[in-house]
Amino acid sequence: MTRFGPACHDAPVIAVRVLVAVAGAYLVASTLLSAIKTVVLPRASNTAITRTLFVIVRRLFEMRAHEGRPFEQRDRILALYAPLTLVFLPGVWIVLTIAGFTAIFWGTGVNGVSEAFVTSGSSMMTLGYVRPDGLGRVALTFVEATLGLGLVALLISYLPSMYAAFRGRELLVGLLESRAGIPPSPVEMLTRYQRIESLDAIDVDLFPIWEPWFVDIEETHTSTPMLVFFRSPQPGRSWITAAGCVLDAAALVASTLDRPRSSRSELCVRTGYLALRRIADVFGLPYDPAPKPTDPISISRREFDNVCIELEAAGIALKANRDAAWQSFAGWRVNYDAVLVGLARLVVAPDARWSTDRPGERVVTRIRRTKPR
């Protein structure tokens, strides 16, 4: 029978210590599960720990980077949000693990909460200046020390992998500037391809490289939602406005340009809207999963006609039936319209045509609980 010390002879105190030890074990298990789901599990899944930290830190940054500030100031402030939260997250894991083992040590007979805390902290940091009595409690110190080393190892591997994913994302975002300007515009993109007499090659030059990009951001930005808030090095760039520019260009090629039907552009639109929808799912952004081609979109017919005038002025041949072209474009755009606009508001993206310039209410930052797919 386990001995709890001279102060624990009566059953009620023993029961309290057992309950505290169980609660501590649950906290340690939850923290370890949070670390595994955040860093190791390669699919969309998050825990209460990551969600809570995510939302609290974001609220603080939103108070500082309010809408009354110029965008340049807001961009500088929000650029720190994701990196700081990533640094805080492993620290939160370590603090919670120490707290959990403090409860376990106290519940297994270490007298005094302060002594249990010192024992837990010494074990977690592998300082070794406290050795509790009893083989069972010594074994607990070994377990906690192992977990501490594991969390540190996760921290060391976590940040480089995050920045590798960020660099992979930003490579095409940066390359898009030479094709679509800054902020990126589908009209500017198509006009530049026409100007260099490469519009016929857009199916080979552009869309095939953006399909893998959409697949990649779906995986990285759902398994690690914090990547959504990593801002580009240039204030005028954003991964979401780049995505919107490519999708709109592909939709215009598929619907409006007078050229043979392009499977590449259509596949790019489908790959893109599926990726954006799954990212939107992580944040609980609303959208219709099965929209009709005739459903309304945030772009008006007048805006579409103005774009057609710009394209014709650049010498780009358009389909003669403008009504059919509008219906076809709206039928493609309706698949990603809501998620594109919602994600652009969520990340406070810079001004860009047909994404951040859409009217609507501010999106409340949150991250919902997801289950592994």
Image: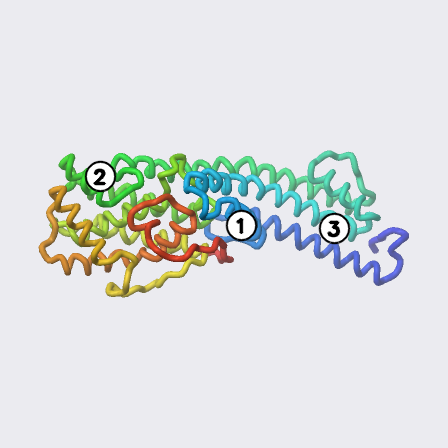
Q: Secondary structure at mark 1?
A: helix
Residue hosting label 2: 205
Residue 313 screen position, x and y as percent: 13, 44
Q: Amino acid at mark 1?
A: Arg
Front position in the image: 8 or 306: 306
In the rendered view, would you say 135 is above or below 321? above
The image quarter containing residue 231 is: top left
Front position in the image: 146 or 46: 46
Determine the residue positioned at 83% across, 43% down.
133
| Screen quadrant of the C terminus | bottom left
Residue 54 screen position, x and y as percent: 53, 49
Determine the residue positioned at 43% across, 55% down.
362
The image quarter containing residue 207 is: top left
Q: Amino acid at mark 2?
A: Asp
Residue hosting label 1: 59
Residue hosting label 3: 104
Residue 334 screen position, x and y as percent: 28, 59
Left or right placement of residue 39 versus residue 341 in this view:
right
